Every structure is written in C-alpha cells, then in structure tokens.
Image: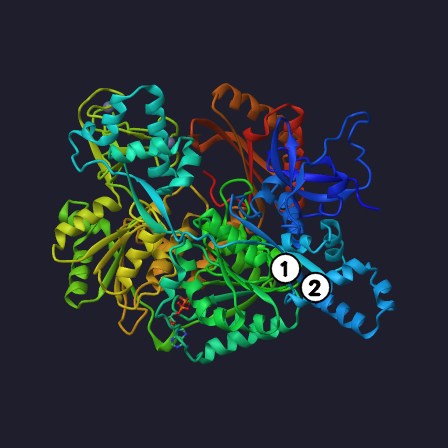
Amino acid sequence: MNSRYCNVALAVPLRTLFTYAIPEIATDAARPGSRVLVPFRNKSMVGVVVELLDEPPASVQPGVKIRALTKVLDETPALTPKLLELAQWIASYYLAPIGEVLRGMLPPVTDVKMLREVLLTPAGRDAIAQWKLDENAPQNLSECTAEETTFLSRLAEKKGLLAFAAALKTGISAAQLQKLQRRGFVEIRERVTGSARRTQRVIAWKGSSEDTKTPKTDGAAMAEAASGDAATERLRRIRNLLETERGPLPLAQLVKLAGVSRGVIERMLRDGVLESWEEPIDPAEDEFDAGYTPPAHELNAHQESVLRAIRERALLGEFGVQLLFGVTGSGKTEVYLRAVQDALARGKTAIILVPEIALTLWIGRQCRAWFGARFEGVAVLHSALSDVARAREWWRVRNGEARVVVGTRSAIFAPLSNVGLIIVDEEQENSYKQEETPRYHARDVATVRAKMENCLALLGSATPSLESFHNAENGKYELLMLASRVADRAMASVEIIDLREEFQRTAQTSPISAALHVGIQECLEARTQAMILINRRGYSWSLLCRSCGAAVQCENCSISMTYHKARNRLECHYCGSMQSVPLTCPKCQSKYVYFFGEGSEHLEERLRKEFPGARIARLDRDTARTKRQFQETLGAFASGALDILVGTQMLAKGHDFHRVTLVGVVSADSSLTMPDFRAAERTFQLLTQVAGRAGRGDLRGRVLIQTFYPEHYAIQDAVRQDYRGFFDREIQFRKMMAYPPFLALANVIVRDSILERAIQWSRQLSEYFIPHDGKGLRVLGPAAAPLARLKKEHRFQFLVKSPKRSLMTKLLSGAIAYCEEKKIPATAVLVDVDPLSLM
Ligand code: ADP
Ligand code: ZN
Ligand code: ZN
C-alpha cells in the first residue's frame, strides 16, 4: 500500500518536521529525498520529504486536519538516501534545524527550464532482451502490463531516451512511468537545458570620485539629495548590495534582491549612479581551458610511495582517513589527481574540496584536462556560480553525467552516487567552516560522508590543523608524508625583520621596512616577482581622536570603521554599514581626528610611490569583486605582466607561481594578538602558507616577515618551517588549558537588538546551565561576547566544554528544548559546535 502521509523538513528555524497528507495522484512520486511544494502558514514553501508514514504521527492531535502537499517537484528524489542520512547527522551533531541543513544541499530553485527525460536502464534493457527470448512468461514475472512492455520496446528503439512529454504521447501514463522507474527499468531524470544566452548584463555601483574633500559631489549623493525618502532608502539598499554585501550582480538578480523594478535600475544607469557591462554567464571554461595542457610529471619516488599507500587503502573498499602532510610545493596536487584517476578506473566517483573559489579554477581546469575526455564529466560547484549554472552542474552530478566534483565547502553535499574518494585540500583552512546555520565543518563532514559511503577520505595539508595531526598521532588517521619539494627545490629561506629595532633606528613605523624595501628592489632588478601580504583591506584601519582617544565605531557593531579612500568613506567590515568621513570627533567634537593603521589600499599607494617603475596590482575583496576580475589579476601575475602583487590572505592560498622569489609579510602580529586560543596556530599556518608561495620554480625563494614579537614560538617555528616542533609545543598548551582537540567545545551566543531582552534570556539560559556545570561539563558565562554588538544586536556568550562529546551534545539539545519551553525565540540563541572563532 502506498503511504498516505509524509514528514517534511522546511527551511525554518523550527526544529520539528511537518506532517502533510499525500494526495492520491502523488503517492507514487513522493519519496524520501523528494522536494515538495507545501502550504505553510499562509504561503507556499519548498520542503524535502524526510520519511513516509502510513498513519499520521501520534504527535498530531486527533481532529486536527492535516493539510495536503501541493505538488511533488522531483520525479527522481533530488536527494539520495545517503545525503538524507548525512543531513540527519549534521542536524544532530551541530544541533542545527534539519530543514536548514537540507536547504544547503538542494539545487537552487531557479526559473531555469528543466527538461524531464525518461531513460532506459540496463535492467530495462535486460528485461526487453528476455521478452524477446520468451514472449509470455517473463512479462508476468516482471509484473509489466502489455502496455508497459510495448513502451519499453519503443524506448529502446529511440536509443533509450525520450523526453517525458514525448513518452506520455505514446499513450503511457505518468503513474505507469513511475511504476517502471520503481522497478528499475527506467530512470526519470531532470536536466537543465542549456540557456541560449552566453552573456548577461552585470550591474555595479559606480565608485565615487577620487575627490576626498567634497564627497557630496558624486552621483549617488546628488541622487540622494534629489529624491524623497523611499528613493533614498532604495538607493542605500542597492548601494549596500553592490558594494559591500554582494558586489556587482547580474541585472535579474539585483532586481530580485533589491526588490526594485528594472526601470529603476535603468534610470540609475542613465544617471551614472550605476554602471553595467556584459559578462559571460560562466566565465567561460572553454576559454579558460584553451591552449592549456596539464603538466605531465613522472611522479618522484616520494609521491609514488604516497600514492601506493593511498591505492592500497582505497582497494580495501572500506572507510578510512589518511592525512597527507606534504610541505608546500611537494606536489600534492599531482598525487590527488592520480588517486582520483584510480577511483574512476574502479568505476567510482570522487569529490575534491578546495578552500577557495579561485582554487576551483586551477584544479577544475586540471581535472577537465585529465578526466574530461577520458571519463567525461567534471563538475565544478561553488557559491559564486549563477543559479542557472549551479543548477545545471548540480543536475549533471545527480544524473551521473559528471563523476568528479571540484568545489568549495558545500560541494561536500554533491549528489554523487558511488563515491570512492573524498579529498580535502588544505584541510586546515577556516573557510571549510560555515559561519552561519548550519555551522558545519566541511572537513569533518567529509570524513562522516566517507564513512557512510564506505570510502577513503584523503586530507591534505602543508600545515595540518592541530585536530587532524592529533588524530594521526593517536592512530585515528593514517599519516602520509611528503617531506621535500619536487625536483629538489629548496624551501624558501625565511627571515625576520624585527620592527622594534627598525623603530629604534628610524623612529618611524612604515609598513615597508628598509630591509623589505631593499628586498623588493632586488627583486625588480632581477626581473622576478614579489608578493606582499597585508592582513587588512581598506586604506586605514580606523579613525582615531587624539583628544579623547575614541575610535569611530560602527553604529551597529562594537568594532571600529575602516577608511576606504577610493570610495571616500568609512565602512564596517562586519555589517557593511557605511558613513561619511567625519571632520570632527563624533564623541568630543575635537577636530584632531587622524587615520590609524595602514590597509592594503594604502600599501598599494605607498608601493607605487616607492617603486614608480614597477607594475603593481592589488588583490583583495575590494579589487576582486567578481570571479572575472580575480581571474584577470591572477592571470596577469602568472603571465609576468605584473611585478608586485599586494593583497590580503587571498594571496596566501595554494597558488603556484614560478617566478616569485620574494614574499613579504607586512605584519605577523595582528593574527597573533587575536583573543583566541587558536591565534598561534593561525599565525603559524599563515606564515608557512605564504612562505610556500616563494621559490616554487627554479629560482630560490626568500620570505621576509615583519613583527614586533620575533621571539614568539609561532613565529620562530614558522621561520624554521618546523611543523613538528610547533605541533609539540602547541598541543601541550591545548592540553594544559583544556582546549580542543582534548575537549569538545561549543560557543552559545544569546543575542537581541534590545539589550534588556538579551540579558534576560542569558540569565534564563544560565539557570538551565548552572545545575549541569561540573558533572563532566564546564559551562562558562554568560559574559559579553568579544564582539559585544554585531549588526545591531547585543551578544552574550556561554562556552561549553566537555571531555565527552555526547554529554555536551545532550546538554545543548536540552538547552534548545529549554529555550522553546521558556519562549526564547529560536533565532535569539545561536549554537556553534566546534567553533573556529569565539568572537
Ligand atoms: P603543493 O600542492 O604540494 O604545494 P603542487 O601540487 O602545487 O604542490 O606542485 C608544485 C609544482 O610542482 C607544480 O608546478 C607541479 O606541476 C610540480 N610537480 C608536481 N609533481 C612533480 C614532479 N614529480 N616533478 C616535477 N614537478 C612536479
Ligand atoms: Zn574625541
Ligand atoms: Zn557594523
């Protein structure tokens, strides 16, 4: 009998499932993993069927009418049973609402044209072959009606593929098709049809004039002055979207996000407030790939032996985690590609996770060159793809057309079946952790998915996270090592520039010390390239008052505003709010305000002055606002059209440029002085990673690190490039201070825009926590969070620690239930399990 009810997860902050009745006509189509359209409150929502029920669950009060779902959106359930299982694990481990977890796994709901097709499966072919042999009996055996067998034969004649609509025209019904699918004779699948347009119109905010003294002359300000309140608000919203929140957007998306009409945008374009250009819908892969041949290196002996170990492990066909600890430039990528090749040859599929969108470009290209022709089908998944492109890639994967997926964090949810290998490159990277609900860590999800798929997870890094290396030490992971660079290349030499000495000598603190200046000069003379890393974007970190000492703070956050010179205003890097540059101190009205701390924009300007002949570019979130801009700058640098590349952390990761002989780190200190138990680890990782960008070709590399704390062990170990030494010291510290990986840790934030409410709720929550403190658990707090105000909300914090994770999970789910009972809104309490940042 068909199920009459189903439990549906909806992307709402509530943690319950919702029961719907399945209408008669949909009983065949609604299956676990199917997306369905359901009435919720007074609107329609897309949800996912989590389970089918024959009876309404006991929790539904008798007499309460169960509403029916409106429509089943997928013929083939969008999510596989394994992905559903993974979602359930994430929901319980990270205490995240299941609906929100599932939302992150689904393809974008777009108005793209989906073509529904009916495909003959191998089983279907076999069945037909059998009927051909014996006209009567097997028909009954496979329980097919004459109509259905006729249809299958028709389908076979059509090369095993018919559009769904065409299939119906042969006289078979949708219900019959679904029956055939359930028996495994056909597959009904969805495909995103290629959109004819290859380019789209992208809209950007037109940067205000360079003029710093008269900010009110730019188009925006004039438009602001000229129109009423609603218009000003609209303008502010558009500006916010285009400049801080999202960057340049395709017209259609902007219209949707800003909630304005096309006419409004057109008018603003005419007024010169906005600008537009045509951009390929996907920065065309074929264009990027043209003329590219992947390096075909013979593996060296070290790479060979690592590959052998991976092979042996993979052949077992069971779950396992290997940690590939290979210094920068040791040729890890080459090993990954061969391991993937192996997996494909065994008939399996593979996922490669990388920490940055930019890296999907390089690795995606390599994969397409390696596997594209031979096995067909590499898909790239990341958040910067247009919805259409993402939907297309997603369905290619779901339909089995792509067997290798390269992507960022969320690609761990790629709907591949038959996964044989999951690679997580640079596993230590923070970007693998999602900083909004569900707050999962893709590396950890990768190991869980590997376990569910019964396959191998391969984590790679030049500076493994303490957690992972600890797991290797205690035997949970198998450790593989690549201890030297390929082709006998030397590691770069790392030198410290002591800024205290520099200051004593020059009585100045320039971000470019004398030694760094000389280094760059030498680089220019030798016609090699330099990369200069600075940790902040913008022109000045903050605007300070000499009279009262106050910094200009964001009105929504307890954080100082950053000055951006080209845009001539102050910006908050947390919430995106902006304000004009005040001439007097907002607190004491003194006019002695000054800019403090140089950011990337300032540094670029300074370098241009100090090295007038040099070709310089900057790479940070302000200059690389689109994937294309990013690609262009990196391309120019790779081709030798630039001498110096200045930038933020974006520069530190994974790039393989062969003519870089100098890497300068303007300051190692800001990451070191963060109030966070991971500060030392982060600093060590960052320095090792940037050092890894130098000397990757035949030329020797040199790294100059400027710091006020030259004796700090994180810096000393980075100079010696001594991971082991660093690990041994740091792990002692973690043990002593009772921090992860020795304990499970969670950060609970209580937040509200009204201070009294935030205080009251944290008090209430504290009442729940107190009795549990001490019983194998520690609960610290409530205390004001380090970011005591963020995006207009007041924030209080609890830290929960336990040597036993199950205790912590139980306590936290109890806390959530308690909040529900006390009517503390679900959105006011934020639970971050395994937090990377305690801000
Ligand atoms: P990692 O990811 O370990 O930092 P990469 O995989 O980027 O290192 O490799 C560094 C460089 O060495 C790349 O340019 C790559 O093409 C090259 N390479 C890899 N394996 C070999 C090899 N066996 N012989 C020579 N060059 C190699
Ligand atoms: Zn002041
Ligand atoms: Zn802010």
- Asked if the residue at label 1 sits under 8 Å from ligand 1, the reply is no
- Residue 739 or residue 554, whichever sits in front: 554
User: Which percent across, then down, holds residue 50?
Assistant: 70, 44
Q: Helix or strand or loop: what does disc 2 sit on?
A: helix
User: Which percent across, then down, holds residue 743?
Assistant: 58, 47
Mark 1 residue type: Leu
Query: Is residue 804 among the parts visible in the rendering?
Result: no
The mark found on residue 407 in the picture is: none
Counting residues from the start of the chain, the first of labels 1 and 2 encountered is 2
User: Which percent across, then down, holds residue 297?
Assistant: 41, 78
Task: Please state if 605 lies on the left or on the right of 735 as rendered.
Answer: left
Q: Exactly how many numbered labels are in the figure?
A: 2
Cα distance in 3D space between marks 1 and 2? 9 Å
Residue that carries the numbered disc 1 in the rendered image: 162
The quarter in which the C terminus is drawn is: top left
The mark found on residue 154 in the picture is: 2
Ligand 1 is located in which of the four quadrants?
Answer: bottom left
Look at discs 1 and 2 and give the one toward the viewer: 2
